[in-house]
Amino acid sequence: MSYGKLVRDGLWHNNPGLVQLLGLCPLLAVSNNVVNALSLGLATLFVLTLSNLTVSAIRNVVRPEIRIPVYVMVIASLVTIVELVMNAYLQTLYDILGIFLPIITTNCVIIGRAEAYASKNRILPATVDGFMMGMGFLLVLVALGGLRELLADGTLGQGMHLLLGPAMEGIHLRVMPEAVPGLLLAALPPGAFIGLGLLIALKNLIDARQKRGVAPAPAPTAATHTQPA
């Protein structure tokens, strides 16, 4: 498989959030704004990339009978690193994300890529696959978080100082005037399902238009070849 195909699959054609529909619990639960979505997306990207790298590196020394427990231990170790770092340096964000950080260990995207790709391929392709799948997941999270925050609060990037430091406090983009009431539904769990559905519909619409754009010209009919009398 070429690296270009790994990029296209991760970001678009086989995107974990829009096509595979994996890891939906954290995707829907913490995507109520851009900061939460970006934070969980970066954590998932880190774990997915390094777990694919590690699984590929040890694939020839792990017996097939115990491969899944070993993969889970690798993923759990990486998740623990993320938790400890976030707890030490991003305490408020750590409290906000809560249970959704440790359950990255059971994210179907991560264990799925470890079993389906990293365990069968060399280190570099496996690492690229993990990174691009993680990027695809992150972009969907941020898009969904941005959509929900925009509709609910009229802003984008509010609370970014929780992730990037005190220098970003109070810096965000206000898209809609404060006088315009927000849409409460967007901030609630049903808003997450509706938002994800809209993103999936948009992707399918773009794919359908691209297919029509590259569709081959119809074959000439017999009448086309008929010579005038």
Image (tube, helix red, strand yellow):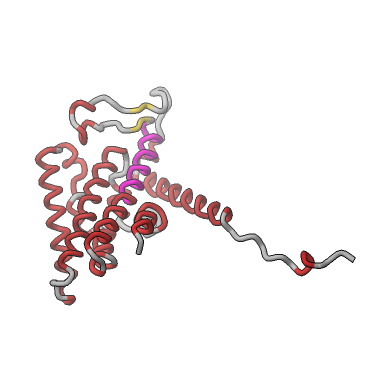
Residue 104 is situated, as x and y percent measured from the top left of the image, at 21, 54
- Quadrant (top left, top right, bottom left, bottom right) of the N terminus: bottom left
Quadrant for residue 228, please give it: bottom right
Residue 138 falls inside the magenta stretch: yes
Q: Residue at x 23, y 27 (%)?
A: 168
- Quadrant (top left, top right, bottom left, bottom right) of the C terminus: bottom right
Q: What stretch of residues is rendered in magenta?
A: 137-153
For residue 213, above or below residue 122:
above
Residue 213 is situated, as x and y percent measured from the top left of the image, at 57, 53
Residue 14 is situated, as x and y percent measured from the top left of the image, at 38, 58
Residue nearest the observer in this picture, 87 or 25: 87
Residue nearest the observer in this picture, 101 or 140: 140
Quadrant for residue 35, please give it: top left
Q: Residue at x 12, y 38 (%)?
A: 89
For residue 61, above or below residue 99:
below
Q: Residue at x 13, y 48 (%)?
A: 83
* Name of the residue lying farthest toward the right: 229
